[in-house]
């Protein structure tokens, strides 16, 4: 999922350009004082098992009715797990070497962690990715 905050406008969309911020309104908060585009994934922890559950992410993604979205926002909150930084403060970072992009993420780490719904937790990312390996 691509998280974009440019000129004060927040967007969340899939790689196929499907806008999906409506399904995840808890990610609408904007913690950034500059334009930024991040690559990551949505994660949802199953309250019964305490494990990241991709099916719950899809359940949230497929929700269309506002009352259902509001209920799931309260009962199944999501987290945005950041993997990469694509643009920062007007600079396209995609052609930078990975180690430079990771350093840029670290520079913005305090800003990112200031937003309770946007995390760079390596453990959560590991758990989420283990679902695919």
Image (cartoon, grey):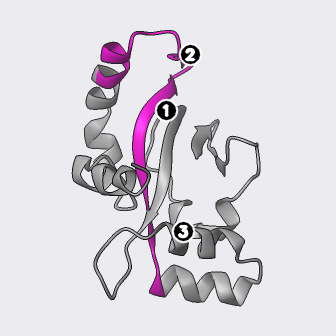
Question: Residue 7 falls in which quadrant of the image?
Answer: top right
Mark 1 or 2 closer to N-term?
1
Query: Given contact means CB atoms under 8 Å apart, are the residues at marks 3 and 2 in contact?
Result: no
Crowding at mark 2 (Cα within 10 Å: few <14, some 14-19, many 20+): few
Q: Say which element carries label 1.
A: loop
Q: Is residue 28 above or below residue 93?
A: below
Query: Mark 3 or 1, which is nearer the eye?
Result: 3
Query: Mark 3 or 2, which is nearer the eye?
Result: 3
Query: Given contact means CB atoms under 8 Å apart, are the residues at marks 3 and 1 in contact?
Result: no
Query: Given contact means CB atoms under 8 Å apart, are the residues at marks 1 and 2 in contact?
Result: no
Q: Residue at x 40, y 43 (%)?
A: 82
Q: Residue at x 39, y 48 (%)?
A: 133
x, y percentage for residue 127? 30, 57
Mark 3–mark 2 Cα distance, whole angstroms, equals: 29 Å
Crowding at mark 3 (Cα within 10 Å: few <14, some 14-19, many 20+): many
Closer to us: 42 or 28: 42
Left or right of 50 on screen, residue 30: right
Residue placed under numbered mark 3 in the picture: 57
Q: Is residue 129 above or below residue 25?
A: above
Mark 3 or 2 closer to N-term?
3
Which region is colored magenta? 75-102
Left or right of 125 on screen, residue 54: right
In the image, farthest residue toward the front: 133
Mark 3 or 1 closer to N-term?
1
Crowding at mark 1 (Cα within 10 Å: few <14, some 14-19, many 20+): few
Assess whether residue 92 is covered by the magenta stretch: yes
Residue placed under numbered mark 2 in the picture: 92
Assess whether residue 107 is covered by the magenta stretch: no
Q: Say which element carries label 3.
A: helix
Residue placed under numbered mark 1 in the picture: 34
Question: Residue 24 falls in which quadrant of the image?
Answer: bottom right
């Amino acid at each position: 999922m691509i998280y974009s905050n440019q000129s004060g406008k927040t967007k969340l969309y899939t790689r196929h350009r499907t806008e999906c911020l409506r399904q995840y309104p808890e990610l609408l908060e904007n913690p950034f004082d500059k334009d930024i585009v991040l690559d990551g994934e949505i994660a949802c922890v199953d309250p019964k098992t305490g494990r990241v559950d991709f099916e719950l992410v899809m359940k949230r993604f497929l929700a269309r009715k506002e009352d259902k979205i509001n209920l799931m926002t309260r009962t199944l909150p999501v987290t945005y797990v950041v993997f990469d930084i694509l643009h920062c403060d007007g600079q396209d970072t995609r052609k930078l070497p990975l180690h430079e992009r990771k350093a840029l993420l670290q520079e913005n780490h305090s800003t990112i962690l200031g937003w309770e719904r946007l995390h760079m937790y390596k453990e959560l990312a590991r758990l989420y990715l283990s679902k695919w390996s």
